[in-house]
């Protein structure tokens, strides 16, 4: 066997190992949902940190997304004399795709890396071992609480991002495109079907799961002191972004398969 | 469990970390109420032994018993029950950064929720008083010096109410007054019948508190006996540890007469 194939083999085995470990962590985290202690105080704290802490960036993300969509959409619709229907385009694309994905990417950057670096530094300073020595299950105490908080907060933040994006589109429509407000809002809501809303809410739940679990996994598997903390943090951002985009495609495809 | 059964037993324990053997054929017994000191050079495997006893590592060979129950193959859930009987003072304290000193020291009492808030608070203050830090209760660990953190770590172990205490270098980084204080504390807990394992390379403290001393080098037991037996030992590796200045400077280069196959640290 040449050195190159050996290297490839080791790499592939490495990935398989990571996937296996990640799956085990997810299973243990979910198992933590099913039995006491519930760590309500930790959950409330995480809800506040994840939810309230991310509100501002999510609002900004939504606002500018909606505004730029209105500008670009108007350019596309102009030749057909359909500029006044720009809110249809904004409504559906925001609720189905851009709201969930952009909010999740921003939250991955803020919350996911925060989870990873916090757990990573607890790992390298033996605080995780100290928790185990106290008879506490670190996965239940740290991962399960953060997963619950992400599963609740990320859909809520996404709804806010969606709303603000449509509002941003309305600002542009009103100020630059001189579209009647009544017309804008009527068509915005007309275009959003129940299916879009379901898809737009399933996605952030999946993304919340990805953000929480990738962050926790990166934290728990940290090795090698403070250097390791930095690596884990970066790794969590890269991995969760890719997983978010890939699962977004898969979910959309899956939804289209069931009309 | 009667007084005859050991509280903690390691039987021919071997451990590899990565591809490296860290412990080889380590056996030791700690009886209830006994204070055992583990001596050994840096990197000899002392911390590793404590981590094995707590079930933080799993041995590759041999078996470990706590309170007569074998823990070698227990899962995390069962281990957490066993761990509640013990408390460990970590080498670098390992305080929870996100909690205040009060919450750190009372952590186990809070988690177990058997006492009222007032009772927990009393226990926390009392433990902190033992280590002379009752005025830091509302500080965060980051605001404390290294030696203070260590003492909070000791207070956390005390407050847990555990029947076995494991100390990883409790006096390293402490000034002479606090070193003496920790020694007294261990002696007092001895009279209360607490089982204790003290890892240290501080000989004064070792002689002062030990019922029995174990010395390890390169992951092997080099000596297991009373403090007096240790003092009388003629094994060169032990003599060097006890009094490094007394050895000829090149004794390690002479033909090896003892069981140490690779020098410690
Ligand atoms: N996670 C690990 N992976 C690989 N090797 C390790 C690991 N932890 C410790 N070791 C090695 O195991 C050996 C024993 O380590 P241990 O921490 O038990 O030493 P120690 O006796 O406590 O030393 P010190 O007095 O310096 O604290 C050392 O040689 C160390 O390099
Ligand atoms: Mg050590």
Image (cartoon, rainbow, N blue to C red):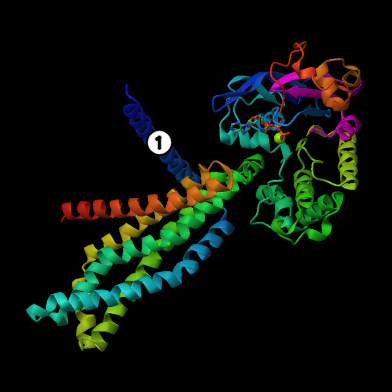
Nearest to the observer: residue A216 or residue A185: A216
The magenta segment is B200-228
| Picture quadrant where residue B244 is located | top right
Q: Which residue is mark 1?
A: A20
| Picture quadrant where residue B239 is located | top right
Q: How many marks?
A: 1
**Which image quarter is the N terminus of chain B in?**
top right
Above or below — where is A151 with respect to A78? above
Above or below — where is B256 with respect to A105? above
The residue carrying pointer 1 sits among few (fewer than 14), some (14 to 19) or many (20 or more) residues within 10 Å by Cα, namely few
Rendered residue at 61%/31% (across/down) = B57
Q: Residue A86: where, in percent of width, then height?
A: 18, 78
Q: Is mark 1 within 8 Å of ligand 1?
A: no
**Which image quarter is the C terminus of chain B in?**
top right
Q: Secondary structure at mark 1?
A: helix
Rendered residue at 86%/38% (across/down) = B186
Whether residue B7 appears in magenta in the rendering, the answer is no
Q: Residue B120: where, in percent of width, then height?
A: 76, 53
Q: Residue A1: where, in percent of width, then height?
A: 32, 21
Q: Position of B19 compared to A238: left or right? A: right
Rendered residue at 13%/77% (across/down) = A77
Q: Chain of mark 1?
A: A
The quarter of the picture showing ligand 1: top right
Q: Position of B224 compared to A217: left or right? A: right
The residue furthest left is A80
Whether residue B224 appears in magenta in the rendering, the answer is yes
Nearest to the observer: residue B175 or residue A5: A5
Would you say residue A33 is visible in this rendering? Answer: no
Would you say residue A172 is visible in this rendering? Answer: yes
Q: Residue B113: where, in percent of width, then height?
A: 68, 50
């Amino acid at each position: 066997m040449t050195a190159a194939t050996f290297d490839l083999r080791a790499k592939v085995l490495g990935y398989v190992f990571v996937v296996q470990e990640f799956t085990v962590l997810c299973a243990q985290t979910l198992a933590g949902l099913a039995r006491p202690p519930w760590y309500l105080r930790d959950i409330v704290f995480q809800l506040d940190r994840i939810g309230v802490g991310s509100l501002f960036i999510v609002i900004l993300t939504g606002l500018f997304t909606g505004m730029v969509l209105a500008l670009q959409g108007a350019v596309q619709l102009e030749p057909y004399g359909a500029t006044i229907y720009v809110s249809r385009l904004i409504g559906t694309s925001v609720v189905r795709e851009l709201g969930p994905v952009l909010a999740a990417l921003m939250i991955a950057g803020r919350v996911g890396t925060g989870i990873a670096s916090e757990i990573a530094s607890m790992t390298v300073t033996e605080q995780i071992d100290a928790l185990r020595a106290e008879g506490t299950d670190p996965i239940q105490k740290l991962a399960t609480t953060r997963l619950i908080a992400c599963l609740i907060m990320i859909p809520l933040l996404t709804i806010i991002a969606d709303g603000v994006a449509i509002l941003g589109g309305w600002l542009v429509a009103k100020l630059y495109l001189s579209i009647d407000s009544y017309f804008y809002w009527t068509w915005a809501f007309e275009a959003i079907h129940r299916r879009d809303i379901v898809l737009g809410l399933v996605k952030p739940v999946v993304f919340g799961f990805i953000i929480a679990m990738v962050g926790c996994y990166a934290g728990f598997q940290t090795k090698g002191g403070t250097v390791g903390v930095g690596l884990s943090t970066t790794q969590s951002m890269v991995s969760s972004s890719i997983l978010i985009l890939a699962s977004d495609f898969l979910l959309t495809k899956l939804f289209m398969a069931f009309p | 469990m009667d007084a005859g059964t050991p509280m903690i037993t390691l039987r021919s324990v071997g451990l590899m970390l990565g591809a490296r053997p860290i412990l080889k054929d380590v056996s030791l017994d700690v009886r209830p109420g006994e204070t055992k000191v583990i001596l050994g050079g840096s990197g000899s495997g002392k911390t590793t032994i404590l981590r094995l006893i707590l079930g933080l590592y799993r041995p590759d060979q041999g078996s470990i018993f706590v309170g007569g129950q074998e823990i070698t193959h227990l899962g995390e859930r069962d281990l957490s029950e066993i761990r509640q009987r013990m408390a460990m003072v970590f080498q670098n304290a390992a305080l929870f950064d996100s909690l205040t000193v009060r919450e750190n020291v009372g952590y186990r009492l809070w988690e177990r929720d058997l006492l009222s808030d007032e009772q927990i608070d009393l226990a926390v203050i009392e433990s902190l008083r033992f280590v002379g830090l009752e005025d830091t209760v509302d500080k965060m660990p980051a605001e404390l010096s290294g030696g203070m953190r260590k003492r909070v770590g000791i207070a956390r172990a005390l407050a847990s109410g555990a029947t076995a205490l494991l100390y990883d270098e409790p006096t390293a980084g402490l000034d002479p007054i606090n070193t003496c204080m920790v020694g007294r504390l261990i002696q007092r807990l001895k009279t209360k019948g607490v089982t204790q394992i003290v890892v240290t390379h501080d000989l004064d403290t070792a002689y002062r508190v030990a019922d029995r001393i174990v010395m390890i080098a390169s992951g092997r037991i080099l000596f297991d006996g009373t403090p007096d037996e240790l003092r009388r030992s003629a094994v060169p590796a032990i003599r060097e540890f006890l009094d490094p200045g007394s050895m000829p400077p090149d004794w390690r280069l002479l033909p090896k007469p003892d069981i140490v196959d690779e020098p410690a640290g």
